[in-house]
């Protein structure tokens, strides 16, 4: 945290990513960082009476940057895992996701995760899906720093499939891929997203309490509705 001289208030740094629709991404028209996570953390900061500023980096650097204390907070559609909990603390869950496989429209060969052995499956470096592919399949997992590159490789025919978080795959397929990307099979895991803090952070408790309040007072539902409503 740094000091904001104008208000003499502490400014907390929030590490996030800018290529993970619809949680954190750059709005093409305004050039602003927008998304469900961005709205949520802004509302939480307001509820808690703190000031924040965003630092954008690739997903893979966020856990390390938060655990070292370089950032005060991390929010990036980050799944709460036991392994990550060894180096960072999380709030209560704020979003329920899970992994889904997707292929290019017209690919009938891959119908589910059982068909990926020996295939090139694109994913993102440092993600739960990279870990899933390595632990549970014989696929040739190819990890990219940004998930958009993974989708582009599938659409260009350089990768056979992509495995990633269902809300991101759905949103990307619908809004960015022009019907060229289709999900196959069932959702593979249940994963809860949490907001990350350095181990022992007192701010974690403040934000966790604010999250409870926003879930109770309807603000959370309003933000959810805005990004995921019909
Ligand atoms: N939920 C996934 C993970 O935690 C992916 C998150 C992301 O790409 N922002 O690994």
Image: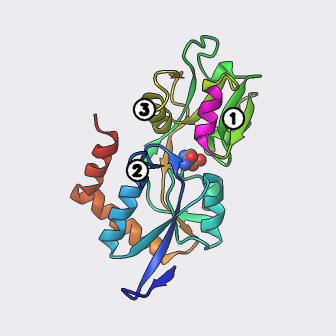
Confirm whether the magenta stretch covers residue 33.
Answer: no
- What distance separates the C-alpha of mark 1 from that of mark 3? 26 Å
Q: Quadrant of residue 109?
A: top right
Q: Nearer the viewer, residue 92 or 32?
A: 32
Q: CA distance from mark 2 to mark 1?
A: 27 Å
Q: Count residues near mark 3 (Cα–Cα under 10 Å), then give few for <14, some for 14-19, many for 20+.
A: few
Residue pointed to by mark 1: 133
Disc number at residue 35? 2
Question: Dot 3 lies on which element?
Answer: helix
* Residue lying at 50% horizontally and 50% vertically, measured from the top left: 77
Find numbered disc 2 in the image and state the secondary structure of the residue it sits on. loop
- Magenta part of the protein: which range? 146-154
Residue tagged by mark 3? 175
Does residue 117 appear in the picture of this structure? yes
**Residue 55, picture quadrant:** bottom right
Which residue appears at 70% of the width and 40% of the height?
143
What residue is at 30 percent from the left and 51 percent from the top?
Answer: 223
Position of the C terminus, as image quadrant, is top left
Left or right: where 79 falls relative to 8: right
Q: Position of residue 75 (x, y in %)?
A: 49, 58
Verify whether residue 150 appears in magenta: yes
């Amino acid at each position: 945290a740094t000091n904001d001289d104008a208000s003499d208030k502490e400014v907390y740094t929030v590490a996030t990513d800018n290529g993970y629709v619809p949680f954190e991404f750059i709005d093409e028209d305004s050039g602003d960082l927008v998304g469900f996570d961005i709205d949520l953390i802004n509302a939480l900061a307001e509820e808690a009476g703190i000031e924040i500023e965003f630092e954008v980096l690739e997903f893979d650097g966020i856990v390390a940057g938060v655990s070292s204390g370089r950032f005060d907070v991390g929010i990036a559609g980050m799944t709460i895992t036991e392994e990550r909990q060894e180096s960072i603390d999380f709030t209560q869950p704020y979003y329920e996701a899970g992994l889904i496989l997707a292929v290019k429209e017209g690919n009938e060969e891959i119908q589910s995760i059982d068909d990926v052995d020996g295939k090139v499956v694109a994913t993102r470096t440092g993600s739960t899906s990279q870990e899933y592919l390595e632990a549970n399949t014989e696929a040739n997992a190819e990890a990219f720093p940004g998930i958009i590159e993974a989708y582009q490789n599938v659409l260009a025919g350089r990768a056979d499939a992509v495995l990633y978080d269902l809300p991101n795959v759905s949103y990307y397929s619908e809004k960015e891929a022009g019907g060229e990307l289709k999900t196959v099979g069932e959702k593979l895991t249940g994963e809860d997203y949490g907001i990350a803090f350095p181990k022992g952070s007192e701010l974690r408790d403040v934000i966790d309490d604010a999250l409870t309040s926003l879930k109770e007072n309807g603000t959370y539902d309003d933000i959810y509705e805005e990004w995921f409503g019909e």
